[in-house]
Every structure is written in structure tokens, then in C-alpha cells.
Image (cartoon, rainbow, N blue to C red):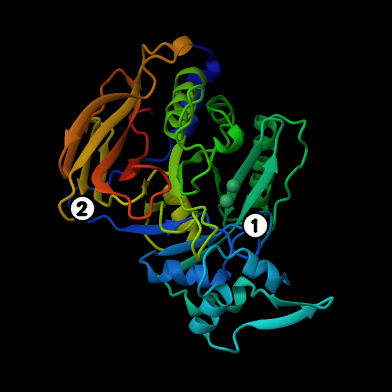
Amino acid sequence: MGWLMRFIPLLISLSVVVSASADSPQRFFKGNTHAHSLWSDGNDFPEMIIDYYHRNGYDFAVLSDHNVFAKGYRWQSLGEIKGRQKEHGPGAIEKCVARFGPDWITWETMEGQRGVVLKPLNEYRHLFEAPGEFLIIEAEEISDTSASGPVHINALNLEHLIAPLNDKTLSTVKVMRQLLRTVQLQEKEIGRPILTHLNHPNFYWGASAEDLAAVVEERFFEVYNGHPRINHEGDEHRPSDEMIWDIASTIRIAEMGEAPLMGVATDDSHTYHGGDVSPGRGWVMVEADDLTADNLIHAMRAGDFYASTGVVLSQVRYDPKTRIIELEIEADGAAEFTSELIGTRKNYEESVVQGIGETLATSIGQSVRFEVPVDALYARVVITSSAEHSNPSLEDQHKQAWTQPVGWR
Ligand SMILES: [Zn+2]
Ligand SMILES: [Zn+2]
């Protein structure tokens, strides 16, 4: 073990994982951190998308359009808006007028083409936001490309747009690292935290588990993304998103003395009138003191959140002294729940990917109690419901939840 490996864990073990006392109730804020609107390649008005999340029990919502902020002037032609509609019946225009009234939409003709001026966030956020009840966080999907494929990173709570490098000769590691350094500089400049997560690593196979392991500046990635064409389950040669989590985390902990990745679930919604990239598929539940962007980000960095596609946890507790993780799962009709403790033991074989992300224990029922084995590098829990997802992005998709890795400090 080199000096660096012995030293780094001290630096990164300052925050404490979920460890509230057993009698204090946990309050989780529900939010989706990835959605697209007409500002880029989505097919609905941003205020309609925020309205969807507001009406559907979310506490916070994020619009993360590709390389653009909902600020200033943006015009879309009526032809483009109608062309993106995926089903017959009322589309973006009709629904927006029905919701906000006939005078809401600003029409403008540009070079003979009829079109709409999109509203910037500051013109409608007051209709939804209320302290402690609903929050909108500004974001960008920094959409870049490396020699391997797309490199998309969501950045939340930033002030200035971050431009992609657009250099296809660079490796994914270089692109990620350079973008994340730019984020860090902006964070210092504006004096508030910016949360980043690496999106859909298997989308055109742009980012490998090894890439994700190497770029330790990135603490978060999408273990689930609701877009159906992101190769969530991998293929015969390449690991699933969930296995990428275990491979990258194992490399980081065992070989680099670094913290594992944390997993978020997101919608990445693009279509809101039919189409197969619709909202309501994946989200995060963040245990924070207060509903502010800074608090949510600090809580997520401390690991105080879980990812979900439908399974709701009323309690998530881990005691680092006893290495016991306890969960309470909320009832969902007659659904039954299977919880698996997933982790990598210290004697795993790197060369043959043997023992990485194996099932260390299984539990059935709503009350879950696991002891993380002492020889495990880390462990995390995935809960799978017998109930099917109501709006699946995958065949035979069941509702799930994923807690963050523990036992690695
Ligand atoms: Zn993307
Ligand atoms: Zn996206």
C-alpha cells in the first residue's frame, strides 16, 4: 500500500453517512434531476414540465437542457413544436393554453415562420415555488463527446453555462476531468455547491466503468435513467449500469483508496405527449434539513439519499460501528419486496471480474436488517418490488430502490 492510499481515506472520511438517531423521523425530499424541454430537444414547454412534477408529488424539479439555460431569448418554430409531438390529440400548444390561458403564449413570426418565444425560468418559477414545499433548481446537461462516444454530465445549481469541449480526439477521462474542473472553478467563484452526475454511461458506450473509477472528481452517476435507449442492461460484452457501479466503486476503494460512486435515478424525459421517453420513471429521495439547493446537494454528497423507480423507504439507517444497515419499506398494495445486500469482498479477483458486486445477503419483507461483512470493501442495498413499474423503460421492469454504498470508510 503506497503512502497515497493510506492518506487519502483520511481526507475523504470527514462526512458521516445517514446516522440519525432511531427515534427521529426521517424526511425525504423527492426530486428528478434530469429532464428536457423545448429549450433543447424535449417536446413540451418548460413550465408545463415543472407543472407535471409539481402536481405529481415531487418536492423539487430540475430542467437540464443540452448546453443551454432557460435564460434570455429562445424562439421555436410552430412546425418544430408540432413535429416533435408523438401522438394525435392535444399537443404542447393546446395543453399549455388549457393550463395557463389563451394569453400565456408569446407568438412571434421569424423570417415568415410562425413560432413561439419560450419563457425563461424567472417568468414562471414564482407560480410553483414555495419555501419548504417546492423548489426548482437550475441545471444544464453538459453534452459533450469524447473519442469513445457521448459524455453527458448534469450540473445542478450552477450560475454560468459550461460549454462542451467538442474535441472528439480526447478520451472520456480527459473530457470528464476537464469539464469537472470547470465546474469546480465556478463553484469557487459563485460560492455555492454545484452537484454533477455522469449520465447514462452506456449510451453509445461513451463511458466505461474504468473511466468512471478514474475520474474521482465525479461522485455521482445514473444507476437508472428512464430513456429506453441507453443500454441500461449492458450487452453480452459490456456491464449493466448497475454492474458499472460495482466495478468502478471496487476499483476506487481497493486500488485507489478513494470513495465509491453514488447512484441516482432520473427521468431524462423528452416526450410529454406520447413517445417513449416520458417522465415519472426515476428519481432521488434526499434526506435534508431543509428544501434548498445547497442543503439538498450537501445531503447528497454525504450519501443521505436513495434512488428509486417506485419503491419508497420510510427509513434508511446505517451504523458504522456495528456495520448494520436497517431499512423500512413502505407498503404498496399487495407488493412483496426482495432486498439484496450487494458488495465486493476484499478477496475479489480483478482479472476475471470475479466476486465484484456479488449478492452478500438477501431479505424478504418490509423491514430489512443487514450486517455488512467485515471483509466487504463496501455494501449497498437494492430493493426490488414484485409490482411492475407503471411506466417502464425496460421490458419486465419492476419498481426498485437503491441505497448508497456504506462500510467503506
Ligand atoms: Zn444525455
Ligand atoms: Zn438528457
Q: Position of residue 295 (x, y in %)?
A: 45, 57
> Left or right of 188: which side holds 112?
right
Residue identifier under label 2: 330
> Would you place residue 54 above or below residue 347 in this image?
below
Q: For label 2, count other residues whose C-alpha is less than 10 Å away and answer few (under 14), some (14-19) or many (20+).
A: some
The answer to whether any part of residue 134 appears in the image is no
Residue 42: numbered disc: none
Q: Position of residue 405 (x, y in %)?
A: 37, 34
Which amino acid, by three-letter code, is at mark 1? Answer: Ile
Which amino acid, by three-letter code, is at mark 2? Answer: Glu
Q: Quadrant of residue 322?
A: top left
> Left or right of 119: which side holds 295?
left
Say whether marks 2 and 1 touch (CB < 8 Å). Answer: no
> Would you place residue 301 above or below residue 240 in this image?
below
Identify which residue is drawn at 70% across, 51% down.
162
Mark 2 CB within 8 Å of ligand 2: no
Residue situated in front as seen by the camera: 361 or 134: 361
Distance in Å between CA atoms under marks 2 and 1:
39 Å
Residue situated in front as seen by the camera: 17 or 210: 210
Which quarter of the rendering shows the C terminus?
Answer: top left
Q: Position of residue 352 (x, y in %)?
A: 45, 11
Residue situated in front as seen by the camera: 236 or 289: 236
Residue 190: numbered disc: 1
Number of disc labels: 2
Identify which residue is drawn at 37% across, 39% down.
404
> Left or right of 147: which side holds 59?
left
| SS at circle 2 | loop
